[in-house]
Image: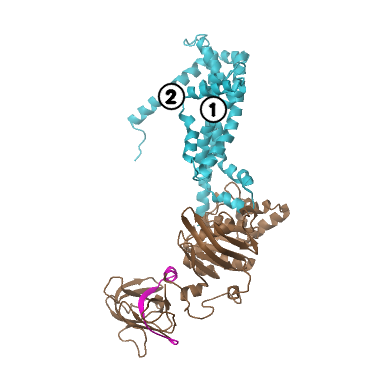
Chain colours: A brown, B cyan
Amino acid sequence: MGAVLAKKSIGPVRREFVPWEDPDHPPFIEFRNVTKKFGDFTAVNNLSLKIYEREFFALLGGSGCGKTTLMRMLAGFETPTTGQIFLDGQDLAGIPPFRRPSNMMFQSYALFPHMNVEKNIAFGLKQDNMPAGEIEARVQEMLRLTKLEQFAKRKPHQLSGGQRQRVALARSLAKRPKVLLLDEPLGALDRKLREETQFELMALQEDLKMTFLIVTHDQEEAMTVADRIAVMDKGELVQVATPGEIYETPNSRFVADFIGDVNLIEAKVMETSEAGTRLKAGIGGYDIDTAQTTDASAGDTVWYAIRPEKVRIHLGEPGEGTVNQAGGLVWDIAYLGDMSVIHAKIGEGDHDVLKATFANVSRMVEQPITWDDKVVLSFDRDAGVILRR
Amino acid sequence: MTRGPTWFNLTSLVLGFSFLYLPIVLLVIYSFNESRLVTVWGGFSTKWYAALLENDQLLDAAWVTLRVAFVSASVATVLGTMAALVLVRSGRFRGRSLFSGMIFAPLVMPEVILGLSLLLLFVAMDQARGFWTVMIAHTTFAMCYVAVVVQSRLVGFDKSVEEAAEDLGCPPVKTFFLITLPIILPGVIAGWMLAFTLSLDDLVIASFTTGPGATTLPMKIYSQVRLGVTPEINAVCTILVAFVTVGVIAASIVSKRQQVQRERDERAAFGAEG
């Protein structure tokens, strides 16, 4: 690490909302050296993380990476083995779930099956002994917000999956919690509905000016909704950054591989300088000239990560001045409709391929490239990232 | 490929049901017998039911039985539900298997042994035997049945529903009464009914643990039968059978209706919008 491209705000960020770039900005949620062990298994390992007010923050990772445990510790359903958790300046140690100012939307929705939609939404408000009139007003507001007005008197089993999801959301928002915790909130929805709901969630978060913390294993979901993403693996944070930074400047092979599609090229450092680094690919033996500086020294083995959409394909000779060329043979073509993925074989082994994509911008045109074509692959000096781990 | 019952199936059905219900049908028929002799048909009459109303001993016994059944079923339901909660909820703790084994042991333990051991306990405690000792004895074995029934209901219970309630500001004990109990209520009621019925027809344990002034109906019937069966006994048994049958049929109709309604609702909900 240490040598990621020193550029600010890669990818879209909300205008003037970058509290994480100010070291003096007080965090809203802070995990401080939190460890959670279940017997011999360490679910969360000495993890520190700061989340800011009004941020939409995503915890992303595969199953068993500790993301859900982290969220459940914040909600109070698990107690950290060591370490502290702060919410709005308050140490949460010893505070039971029912006194915490956060509300959670559960993966299974966890609706109360014996209560109708209205009563489900009103449940949390009643626990606070809110006057009946105010409860009624708040419930109506929530029903309107989640477009559930005509379902108010229905029981959960009389609702579709999408409607249940909205009831769960309305119920967890009704108390206007300081933080809304979303545990895989859209996992049970089909793809179309999920995408719609992602945008609804973002709009809702913007309108209510609340802090949202979402746990998900779906990288697209995290990229879509979140201001910042924490990628987790084996109970540790691997990288915490904006979606753009995570995608364009991953700090490790794990992140590069977990988010999107990537070519990971094992390479040897040939020459380092202020102006950039020269590498030699292990397979194919071609030179890679990059604008990135690295603290690796000549002779070290590194990985060069480059996204398939940043690899260009040339039939025949590429033009003058094309840097970073690798010759190959078209091995496989996947036609995905919006784009095609080409696997070009550059080495002896079956897996020694470089992936390149191109957008299918016009209809009904015969693909110019086909199986067993000899092609040249090239990429720009700043197209990829040097990774040391 | 189902084309109605085959001869084999039909025969099995008839034989099976005759085996189960012929004795009961005979008992019911002879309760309407005019004749004093139980085995000789002397014409239709309801006079034994009228006589029953005058038989204070039998009525007393019935009243004792109902009271014992009601109280012991209620206590057993509370204890059994608690045991089921511990077994399903507390995860792995030291001695869990032992505990669950011990809960279910009385289900297979011979009643004679259970009755005898309870009798010895009451004697050792110098406890006068009567209504309360029978009640305690019935609670003891009925709670195991309740635990089994409630446990099966709890196994399919989504624990995050309780967590959601707590997350929304509801303390654990309140959560139990507002959320958990209403959801497992069908299981609890079924457990109560089972406990009630078991207590109603228990003879062995009651004989061991009762004392003067607390004779239950099964004991009364049994002792009268030994002196000779009267059609009055048939009448009281018929009433008991009717009582139980109506209860069972009503319960199954209600639950069937609920299930049908629920399935219809779910189809409607998912059909209307994906």
* Amino acid identity at mark 2: Leu
- Residue that badge 2 annotates: B20
Give the class, few, some or many, for how many residues have Cα within 10 Å of label 1's Cα (few <14, many ≥20).
Answer: some
| Element marked by disc 2 | helix
Looking at the image, the residue that sits furthest to the bottom is A320
Q: Position of residue A27 (x, y in %)?
A: 62, 68
Q: Which marked residue is nearer to the observer: mark 2 or mark 1? A: 1
Residue A315 position (above or below residue B161): below
Q: How many marks?
A: 2
* Amino acid identity at mark 1: Thr
The part of the chain drawn in magenta is: A254-275
User: Disc 2 to disc 1, how far (Cα)?
Assistant: 18 Å
Answer with left or right where residue A168 lies relative to residue A131. left
Q: Position of residue B219 (x, y in %)?
A: 54, 17
Residue A108 position (above or below residue B180): below
Q: Is residue A274 magenta?
A: yes
Residue A359 in sight here: no
* Front-most of residues A208 and B155: B155
| Element marked by disc 1 | helix
- Residue that badge 1 annotates: B197
In which chain is the residue bearing label 1? B
